[in-house]
Image (cartoon, rainbow, N blue to C red):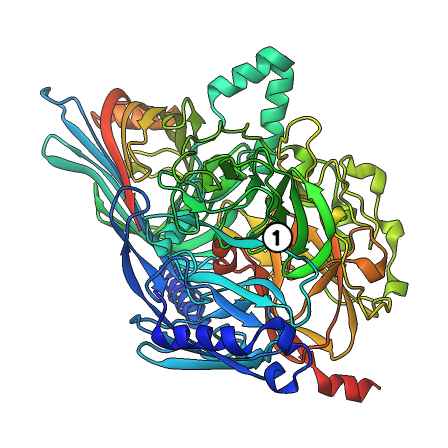
Amino acid sequence: MIRSLVCVLLFCLSATGATAADMERLFKHVEADIDASNWGEAERLVTWDAKAWYGGDTHKAWVKSEGEWEDGTFESAEFQVLVSQMLNVFWDGQVGIRIDAEPTSLLYGVIGVHGLAPQFIETDIALFLSEDGDAHIRLEGDWDIHLTQRLRLTPFIETELFLQDVDERHRARGLATLETGLQLAYDIRREIVPYLELNYETGLGATRSLMRQDGEAEDALTLRAGLHFWFN
Amino acid sequence: MIGRRQFLATLAALFTARPSLARDSAFLASATREYTLSIGEIGVNFTGTPSHGLAVNGQVPGPPLRFLEGEDVVIHVANRLDVMSSIHWHGLLLPPEMDGVPGISFDGIPPGETFTYRFPLRQAGTYWYHSHSAYQEQQGVYGPLIIEPRGADPVPFDREHTIVLSDWLDTDPADVHANLKSMSDYYNYAQRTVGDFFDFASAEGLSAATNERLAWGNMRMTPTDLSDVSGYTFLLNGQPNDRPWFGDMQPGERVRLRFINAGAMSYFDIRIPGLKMTVVEADGQAVRPVPVDEFRIAVAETYDVIVEPKEDDAYQIIAEAMDRSGFAIGQLGGTQGALVILPPQRKRHLLTMDDMGGEHAGMDHAQHRADTNENTSDMDHSTMDHSTMDHAAMGHAMPMGMGIPPVTRDNEHVPPMDAPEGARVLTYQDLVALTPNDDLREPDRELTMTLGGNMERYIWTLNGDKFSEATPIYLDYGQRVRITYVNDTMMNHPMHLHGMFVELENGQPPANRPRKHIVNVGPGRRYAVTFTADEAGEWAFHCHLLYHMASGMMSKVVVSRVNAEVSQ
């Protein structure tokens, strides 16, 4: 399974190379959100979410990373290497691999779509198949509301749906986790955007009890201060 | 800066190439006029911040090139950059290998090398030249090119000024393009806010406001996409408006103003308060005089107007950017520096649902889409089936009949110019060729050119293809061709066919249709042009908005004599 996904990935990467050959200019883009909360208290939390792409309109190579660092340890650290193919005006298909360094070292195959849904909802949907054979779907969406030309309020939601119980990672079949909140961001310039984020994370359904058994907090409300920046 | 050779050439021209002599002298008619141009880097300061640009012979705009109709042109263009360059002679009829488009006409001019352009001049009028390489046009590589008629000028005048309008950004245009790819609304600081929503709601009601937002949101489009790039400093003859260009003028004179829009992305609305402007030439081709108060100039168009000041006054040339983000201004007559005050900015308009391409107008457009897609290939008039189009269902002012200009005097300018009540504004309908067209055949070839684009990805297409994907358009030599542009986007596109003039189907009798090298096609509108494919060779065909062309809105037209012989 994983091997075949890697093959697909390599095939698509070679397609990205073909785009370069037809003399179209290729572009690159690197962006990151880094934020922190609870400074001075016991549970200091730093989270990051970074993405970079390189390519043309039709094919791009992507690298993504996200994770959490809490009180000196990495709670989670995830990396993805993907290739994307334009499906239509608003959507790209993505395929590749995900490597989790934390909480446990694990390899996944990834297939997903990324794009702009009606009403300008930035959407990311991905299916992750782990080397252990389990699968889950992650759905992310956010929506920019312009308060002024530079001040934006962005409600967001991220949820994970597990297709089976994964006891060792404290996830139960069904909707397992939900992260939602509001981000208030100000464009100092387009590329430099400090923000405040009210973030609520919670376990859902049977996952909640698995988390509780493990001593993991079932939900957390945090106020985060962070910086979104990008360059190209 | 005028080079010595150019000075000598000009001097020689003064003695040898007077229009009155040239008329009946075969020797002079074939005289050669030679220029040497050099493309290099220069330091500039248009915005208050030192920056660097590119220039022809060290100046922005480049030096005016003046010729006499019928002369043989020899222009040596030296590339002093460390990247490829080129010069395209915009609007000139010439052999295709002299057209200056890298990848189509020739390979371009390598760094450090000189390319010599040679061609005979077969026309007169106001034209211009610019680099056709990378983003060099945005960086300053452009200038006017004026060809005096061999006979008497149909438009007598006492004095003339060339007015080159352009747009400047300190940011490297390659970075501008990258920013648009990273974030297509990077330059849009006029987006609709929550406050705008409540303003709308208090005027129209909450549900109307909500429905309106939802309708736009469903299409993932915004009515504020008037222009992709903003933050421009606008220049008139290379002068920003804190030190405006000045041109002398005396009362009682007939003054010819040759307007050239050398902007990369900016349309301008032009007026000279206190003076009527009589339009006498469009895109270098003489037209019957049209007195107007205001006109809009699309990117890469030229218009010649006559003004006749009666008072010894200072007059202000006001060229306001269509997206109302600024002005280029200049002063005519009076004491230099008398007029530096900027006029009040006119209202910035939002686009409306009518300004969307058919695909997006919120109705069931399956039929229409199917139709335009079929039309993307060649078609025979007789096989066209208009019954598949449900005109009534369109619900917006987009006449779908082939060959009928969809625009009227009232709605031609989108967004509107907002000229004051009673002011006369030029539209394409007003343009009547001064000398009749000689080929009055009905088209025997129909092409539909769908102008497509996608703000989200910043991709722009012709018939759904980017330049890298497009197959050339093959035409037979001598064929009479109609192109119907269908603008499926919310932006104006100034469409430019190299090598041949097209006749606007603007409601005038075929013999009087104006000949143009640029055709503006308004948002969500159709427009048809006809031309005779009488210039063999390979020609570029593109939207003249620089970042649209660079993002794929370009194709190639091949006019082939071989096919003509085979088919006859």
Q: Amino acid at mark 1?
A: Tyr
In the picture, measured across the screen, residue B473 lies left or right of residue A159, that is right
Q: Between residue B461 and residue A125, name the one nearer to us.
A: B461
Determine the image quadrant of residue A208: top left
Residue at the spot x=58%, y=11% of the render?
B202
The quadrant of the picture occupied by the N terminus of chain B is bottom left
Can residue A211 be spotted in the picture? yes
| Callout 1 secondary element | strand
Determine the image quadrant of residue B326: top left
- The residue that mark 1 highlights is B303
In the picture, measured across the screen, residue B113 lies left or right of residue B479, that is left
Against B496, is B75 above or below?
Answer: below
Within 10 Å of disc 1 (Cα), the crowding (few <14, some 14-19, many 20+) is: many
Determine the image quadrant of residue A43: top left
| Chain label for disc 1 | B
Residue B468: image x %, image y %?
A: 52, 67
Residue at the spot x=35%, y=67% of the render?
B57
The quadrant of the picture occupied by the C terminus of chain B is bottom right
